[in-house]
Structures are given as structure tokens and as C-alpha cells.
Amino acid sequence: MAKRPDQREPFVVRLYVADRESTAVRAIANLEAVCREFLPNGCELEIIDILREPQRGLDDSIMVTPTLIKLAPPPVRRIFGDLSKRGRLLDALGLTGLEIAPRRP
Amino acid sequence: MARRNQKEREPRLAKAPTGIDGVDEITGGGLPRGRATLLTGPAGSGKTVLALQTLVNGARRFDEPGIFVAFEEGFQQVVANAASFGWGIPSLVQKRGRRSPRLAFVDSRLSPGAVQAGTFDLSGLIAAVEFRAKEIGAKRIVFDGIDVLLVMLNDPRVERGEMCRIHDLLERAGLAGVVTMSTTGPEPPGSFMLSLSDCIIQLTHRLAERASIRAFRVVKYRGSAFVANEFPFAIASQGIEVADFGTRPRYRVFAERVSSGIPRLDNMLAGGYFRGSTVLVTGMPGTAKTTLAGAFVAAACARGERALYISLDEQPAEIIRNLASVSLRLERYVRSRLLEIHADQPQATSPEEQFVRLRQRIRAHRPSTLVIDPISAAIRMGGQSTALGVAERLLAMAKSEGVTTLWTSLYQGSEEAMEATPLHVSTVADTWIHLSYRAGRGERNRSLTVIKSRGTGHSHQVRELILDDQGIDLADVYTVGGEALMGTARWERERIEAATQRDVEEEEARKRRELESLAAEIRAQTEGLERRRQSLAAEMRLLDQTVTLRERNESRRLQEVRARRGGGPASRARRRKGRSAPTED
């Protein structure tokens, strides 16, 4: 049974993209949409352009772009791709179950 | 020379030497710079070792830093796997003061549990790698386990696009790239991989007659000459070594002779074996092949040269003991480290390992003289054709190192069919000595024949090989009615010859005595005559004295007479002179 995330717990994600490629643009848009819909308390999102900060990509062993790392709440998860598959994204972020009751007043 | 210069002026493909024995020879200088080399092979075929070794050699020997991008294994795992090769990877990846490390790892494994949610590409990785490459000034790069990535991409069109990206990176950064790819089963990698790679190297691993055979083959090398043959290789204690026999035989040719250890054999060979040449000794069991080898080794050590004795059937202690019975004492040379004796079990290793181990021993000990006894035992390591290949390469390698090599080979067939010696090493050998038994008149005797000796006017006669506690010697063989005499028959013949010799000597002695007595007689006569001549001379001297005395007396008497007859001035003067004579005289 999926445990509901504590709404007050900060939600921290880091997104690695390469420049402004189409996958990068799509990934950012998809992630922002999820944040809007499922994380009303907002989320801490860091977007890193690996072309500008390659060392950070090396530090995090980024193999493909885009790669999303959910740092908090635990467990740390990695999701790669342009995040267009919403079901998998929500599953990996631990937000499944929330989509049944969206848009609270 | 002029032609060569012209050739060098032509633009050539820039290559990065791998520093791996054999690989650089086969590829004509190494792997292409600014391009990708695809390294394929099944799991465990040595792809990662070869790729990593190229990087380590680049960093250590050619001052070319490298990057290892790992899709399959982590840094710790790669380091642990390569630890036994002694490449010192941990020190290569460390910073050297302010200078950047010579080797960098980029861990590009997809973390377990990572979820794919949509399309993606490798641009992030390429950017990170390119950044790192610039940072350390990399000249080489390895993408290890690209198949992991391809499975993940799972779309030929996307795969192609990503490979192009890697290709562009290599070209842009001038990196010599190695991409390893595991091939499970016989299916070839995607055609785009083949067409994108400028150089394709295939590693295989199979069993041949129960021996493990690893093989290296360059399938394609765009814009470069290469040797397309399959070459066996070994993963040895210091990494991969590929046998490069037949690609470029280069060796020094010596005019110097080295002793075989048997003076009369040296005579038969016009002074001995040529230094750096290959000597094959064939023979049936017990024909003293090992003894001949031992004599050769002992002679080398006696000259103060180092020797290496590889036995494929006996233990070192056995060899030393057995050779001592023919007064070949090798123990002192083993103790003084001039001589190394190793007993190898051919069936315990693959032919390649055997080859590589021997090469390492040669390089470690630096012998001038090498013995392999018997090479025919090598058949046990994976069949005749494999053993032949290894034997030929061993010979070529020994030759290229300037080592004089003596091989023994067991031979049991008839002498007529001898050209087909086991392993056919005879065609490679410079000198071929055959030992056999001659049976007859109730005994067996060892015989030695020099069948061939390149560049040497050698005796074609069969000689008898005599072994006893005094050592080894060759005896002339008497032929009677076309049949060589040996053993007792030779001894009888020798006795007859000796008797004749004795007669001749006695006759000579008699004649000498006769002449000597005649000479003595003449000497006596000469002495008598001399004595007579001397007495005659004495007599003549006496006669002369008498004459002088008589003449003086006569002249005085005349003066006296003159003076008495009436003294003139002459007589006065004479008187005066006569008076003063006592003081003046």
C-alpha cells in the first residue's frame, strides 16, 4: 500500500538536461506540470545544464539526458527520459494514488 | 631510400600505438586517432583488458592521458579486475601535484532501479566526457560495454544517432577511441556499428582439441594496411600479448659461431652453430638428445653467457643428475644464476600461455642460449597444428631476440620419411642434427648425422656418438662396403689401424737411430781432423819463431863482424847506443 507523502515534507528534485534540446524542453515542461498538479506546497527544483556544468554531471554519473534525480523525500530515485510517460514518472516519484484525487479547492 | 622518403611524405593516418606486443605490428602502428575502433567479442574474451591496457600504456609509455567510460562495470570493479596485471591504475588516476591525472574514469552505469520515462539521448554524457577529456588533456578514450547502452536505447535509428555523436566527439577532440561491445553468439553487431567504426577488431575464445585458444583479428581498418589473419593471444601476467609471428620477421644475422659443446661436432659444422640460429636435434627415445642440449648449454655457461633450459618432460633435478653422468655439471651454473632450468607441463597450459610465459622468461633472463626439450611434447598442448603455430612463433621470437636456440624433437619413424618431422620444425631450423641407433652385430650404437646446416659447409658423414663418464665425443665411422662401422666393429677396425700405425712408427724409429749413429760417427771424425789441424798450426807457429830468432842472431853477428873490421861512424854510433841501452830499453 502506497504511503501518502507528508505534504509538509520538502520535495527536492534535480534535473539534468543538455542545453535546450527538444528533450530538455519537454522534460522541464512535464516536470513542472507534475509539480503544479501534485505538489501544491511546491517543490525544490534544480535544473542543471550539463553543457554548462559538466563537472556536476560527472559527479552524479549522468549517463543520459534528461535525467531526473529525486533527492527527497527518500528513497533517492533516478528517472531518465523526457518524462513524457507520466505514469512511470509519478510511480518513481512516489506520487501514485494522488492522481485519483487531483485539484483540491 | 629515396622511395622510402617519398612514401613518408604522403599524408598518413595518425595512429595511437597500443604498446601491446603484437597489436601494433598487426595494425601497422596502432589504432586510428580521431576515430573509433570497435572491439567485439563474447563475454570474457578480453575486450576490457585490451581496451584498458591501451589506455594504461598510453598514459605510462606515450604520455597520452586517457579516459575510461564504463557502461558495464564500476571503477572499483575495473581496478580490481586489472590489479593482477600490475598496471598501477590507482596511481594513474591520482592527481600529480598540480598536474591532472593521466587516467580518468567516468562511471556511466545506469543506476539500478532507474526508471525510463520517455525519450532521451547521450548528449549529457558526451558533454561531461568532453569536459573531462579537455581537463586532463586526454588523447585516448574507451567506451566499455556499449552494448549495455544499445539495449537501453533499443531503437536502431536512435542507436545510430548516438553512435554518430560519439564519433563526432572523437573527431572533434582528436581522441583515439575504443568502443567495446559484447557479442553473445555468432550474430554480428548492427550494421551501423560496423560502418561507423573505422577499425574493427574481433576477439574470440574457443576450444580446440581441449586447449583454450584466444584469437585476435583485425576485421577492417579503413585507410590503413593491416594483417587480416587471426592471431592467437594470451592474457598473461602483465596483460594481453598477441603473437605476431609472420607479420614482420626482423632479426640480426650473426656470422659468429658458438660451440656446440662437443669439439668434434664443432669441426663437423665448420666451427659450431651460428649465433642466433635455430638448431633442431631429432632422434628416437634415448638417442642422447638431452645430452646434446646439455652440452650446448654447458658450453654457453662456460663462456659466461646466460642460458635458459625449458624442459617439457623432465624435472630440473632429473636433468642435472642425468647430465652429470656424462660429466656435464650444470649445477654450478644454476647456482651462479647463469643457467635457469624450468620444467613446464605442456598440457597444463594453453599454447598461447606457454608462448607468452616463455617470452617473459626470455625477456627476464636475457639468455644467449635457449633449449626446448622436447618440442614434440608441445603436441600435448592442443594438437599438432596449434603446437606447430606456437613452435614457429617461439622460434621466430627467439630469433628476433638474438637467442641461439636448440630444440629437441622426438622422432620415431623411419629415416626415409624423416623430412616429415614432428611439427615440421625442420623447415624452420637452420641446423638439423639427427641422432639414431645403428643396430647390428649384437649391439646398438648411437650415431649422429648433420642433415642440414644453412650457410655452413658441413660434413655429411655419419659419426658415432660416444657417451661415457668422461663426457661426450664423436668418433669417426669406418665404412666397409658402404656400411658404417660402429661400436665393436669400429673398435676392431681401429685396432687394426692402430697395429699398422705401430709398425710404421717402429720402422721410423729404427731409421732414426741409424741416422743418429751415422751423424755421431761423422761428428767424431770431424773432431779428430780438427785436432790435427790445430797441432799443425802450432807446429807452424813454432817454425816461424825459430826463423825469426835465427835471423836476428844472424844480423847481430854481421854487425859484430863489421865493428871488428875497423870502426867507422856507424860503429861508434852503435857503441854509444849500446852503452846507453840499459836506461833506454
Image (tube, coloured by chain):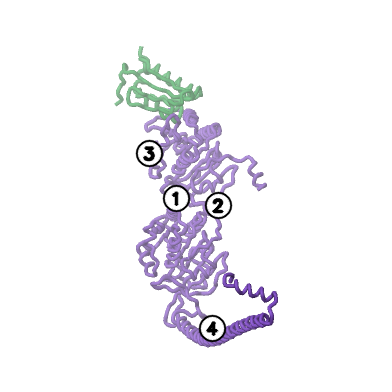
Tell me which label, 3 or 2, sits earlier in the chain: 3
User: Residue B445: image x %, image y %?
Assistant: 44, 76
- Residue B549 shown left or right of residue B88 in the figure: right
Chain holding disc 1: B
Mark 1 neighbour density, 10 Å: few (under 14) some (14–19) many (20 or more) = many
Tell me which label, 1 or 4, sits earlier in the chain: 1
Q: Residue at x 39, y 30 (%)?
A: B114
Q: Which chain is purple?
A: B
Image height check: is B101 above or below B379? above
- Give the labeled residue for mark 3: B77
Mark 3 neighbour density, 10 Å: few (under 14) some (14–19) many (20 or more) = few
- Give the labeled residue for mark 4: B481
Tell me which label, 3 or 4, sits earlier in the chain: 3
Tell me which label, 4 or 2, sits earlier in the chain: 2
Image height check: is B487 above or below B410? below
Quadrant, the C terminus of chain A: top left
Chain A colour in the picture:
green
Q: CA distance from mark 3 to mark 4?
A: 77 Å
Same chain letter for marks 3 and 4: yes
- Give the labeled residue for mark 2: B247
